[in-house]
Amino acid sequence: AAAMAGEALSRVPDVQIDGDGVFKYVLVRVRGAGALAKDVVRGHGWAEYHGEGRRDCECLGGGRLSHRPEERKIHVYGYSVGFGRADHAVTTEKLKAKYPDYEITWADEGY
């Protein structure tokens, strides 16, 4: 059962963000069976966050992303009024894994 739960979690994408512009994001911990969990980045409307299905999800915080694909740059900053500030360093590492050829920066300043 644990292997199946791990497979189910592995099918949840680590990063899903909009393609261009400035938008809010959240860092979400998705729990599988037992102690299995993974943190994922979602940078869209809340429909995507709630769309993780029946899995147990916990929002770890949020902020904003500035995604400029033509420049291959993403900047992570700010905080979520409702959920507090995400650990932007964690978010940045996940973005670097998905976009290895991008310049990805972060700062705690801003809203």
Image (cartoon, rainbow, N blue to C red):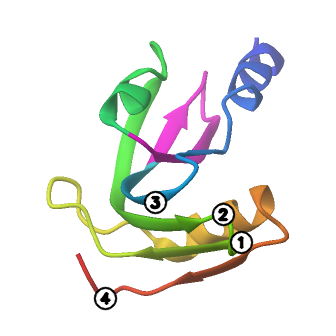
- Point out the frontmost of discs 4 and 1: 1
Check disc 3 and report the residue beneath it.
21
Q: Position of residue 90 (x, y in %)?
A: 58, 68
Check disc 1 and report the residue beneath it.
72
Tags 4 and 1 in contact by the CB under 8 Å rule?
no
- Point out the frontmost of discs 4 and 2: 2
The quadrant in which the N terminus is found is top right
Q: Which residue shows up at 49% across the image and 23% down it?
A: 52
- Point out the frontmost of discs 4 and 3: 3
Q: Which residue shows up at 23% across the image and 55% down it?
A: 83
Say which amino acid is labelled 2.
Pro
Element class at badge 1: loop
- The part of the chain drawn in magenta is 28-44
Whether residue 35 is situated above or below residue 105 in the rendered picture: above
Q: Position of residue 99 (x, y in %)?
A: 77, 62
Q: CA distance from mark 3 to mark 1?
A: 12 Å
Answer with the quarter of the image where residue 108 lies: bottom left
Residue 31 forms part of the magenta stretch: yes
Q: CA distance from mark 4 to mark 2?
A: 22 Å
Element class at badge 3: strand
Out of 64 and 91, give the one closest to the viewer.
Answer: 64
Q: CA distance from mark 4 to mark 3?
A: 18 Å
